[in-house]
Amino acid sequence: MKKTLLLMLALLLAAGGFAQDKPKKAKKEKTYNEKGEIIKTGWNIGPLPVVGFDSDLGFQYGACVDFFNFGDGTRYPRYNYKFNVEVSRYTKGSGVFRFYADMPYLIKDTKLFFDLTYNYSKKFEFFGFNGFEASTFDPYEDFNKDGYHFIKRNTLRFVGSMQRPLRFLPNLNWVAGLAYYNVVTDRINLEGYEDQVTLYENYVDADIIKENEKNGGNIAQLRLGLNYDSRDHNSDPSKGIYAEYTLTGSSDFIDGNGYNSLIQTFMWRHYVPIYKDKLTFAYRLGVQHKIAGNVPWYMINNINTPFFQKMYTEGLGGVVTMRGVNRNGVLGDGFVLGNAELRWHFLDFKFINQNWQLALSPFFDAGMIIQPFREKELKEADIENVELYSGDKEGIHTSAGLGFKIIMNRNMILGVDAGRALDPRDGEKVKIFVGFNYIF
């Protein structure tokens, strides 16, 4: 662990060395804001080797490049727009190809966001539906136990969103967007697991996962919503509120299997300053609720949001929702989510012409299913010598841990989070995640 932290620090320092303003004909004197930070202007380019770790995915390696444009610096630390390209893979058999653009000031009064991502995973976690109602019993524990709760899954995702202000109330905006997902799922097919019977196959045999969705499909979405944003900064806020209500209409008109739905999602983030901008209490409350229709099994882990803080927008469980709880371990038609962090910026310094901060963030995460998915089929499943329904009542899943962040120019954030589930049914080990950005 210590070696990993040192390596990540060295890589981020290297990125800072590459980060540079757009070349000028004559050397320009540095200017500072009231906090003593160097005001960044023009283009800053940060090439960075991707070397991370996720207990659910393994070690990550690859490369990414961030392109920031700060304009004349009057909005610093906010950027005018940002582009990111990443190519990376994990040692447990998954990989990422991603391009995204976040452009809050490219067009006057209009925020634009685009994301094009392809994820492939040879070992993608699947623990069943409805949280504690799903049995964790493994009938094949004497043979390749590690493969029972895994599937193969590949996902192509495109999201395009725009935001414009509503004039009658400051900080209130309307949002519209389109999204497309192509998801391919199958049993795990890695070498050594050829004869492994999996939970996924048992769900298919029990008709909990239907024949017309077992191998994935195509989903198109229309998203409409409102958000309120009074944060002082979007990447590393120390005060303000960000509230988001999204209404998502989904259709599989390409496949024609009848998986059409209407889902509402509400997320509330609040950043409460305790001591200047050095100590902040941050919390997030969220709920996702299906209003009507049917969702295919391969989309129930998707959290519908028009703007992404992290690459993955899936849960519950894992690095973006409940750190320490099994990734995708809590799946249902609807959920509630809560996160709380105390963010302490304990050191500020300048190095290689960049502004740096180090921060610690103890956290507590919680969530539960409020709308079960195919609960009747789960309870009535009958496969010889296989237990699919635990008989337990769904309850609150919780985890706690500590995060450490290295922050450059208040925008490039490298973090290490270590968390553990507080109920052994959600996982019995401390899970470590190394990656970019806060989870909210």
Image (cartoon, rainbow, N blue to C red):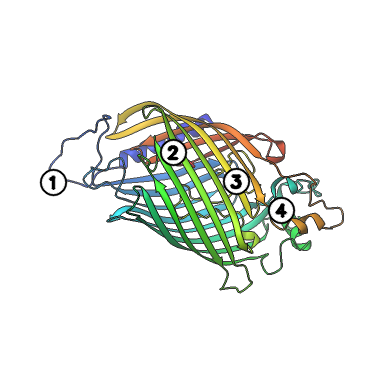
* Disc 1 residue crowd, few under 14, some 14–19, many 20+, Cα 10 Å: few
Q: Is residue 299 visible?
A: no
**Residue at 80% across / 49% down in the picture?**
140
Which image quadrant is residue 374 in? bottom right
Q: Which residue reaches farthest left?
A: 26
Question: Which residue matches tag 2?
Answer: 414
**Residue at 83% across / 53% down in the picture?**
386
| C-alpha span from label 2 to label 3 | 27 Å
Report the front residue among 94 and 322. 322
Report the front residue among 107 and 416. 107
| C-alpha span from label 3 to label 4 | 38 Å
* Disc 4 residue crowd, few under 14, some 14–19, many 20+, Cα 10 Å: few
Amino acid on which the number 1 mark rests in the picture: Lys
Nearest to the eye among marks 1 and 2: give it.
2
Q: Which residue reaches farthest front?
A: 168
Residue 98 in percent (x, y) is at 45, 56
Question: Which residue matches tag 4?
Answer: 192
Image disc number at residue 336: 3
**Residue at 40% across / 38% down in the picture?**
240
Q: Earlier in the sequence, mark 1 or mark 3?
A: 1
Amino acid on which the number 4 mark rests in the picture: Gly
Mark 2 secondary-structure assignment: strand
| C-alpha span from label 4 to label 1 | 61 Å
Amino acid on which the number 3 mark rests in the picture: Val
| C-alpha span from label 1 to label 3 | 54 Å
Q: Earlier in the sequence, mark 2 or mark 3?
A: 3
If the image is split into quadrants, where does the N terminus sit? top right
| C-alpha span from label 1 to label 2 | 33 Å
Left or right relative to 230: residue 282: right
Image disc number at residue 25: 1
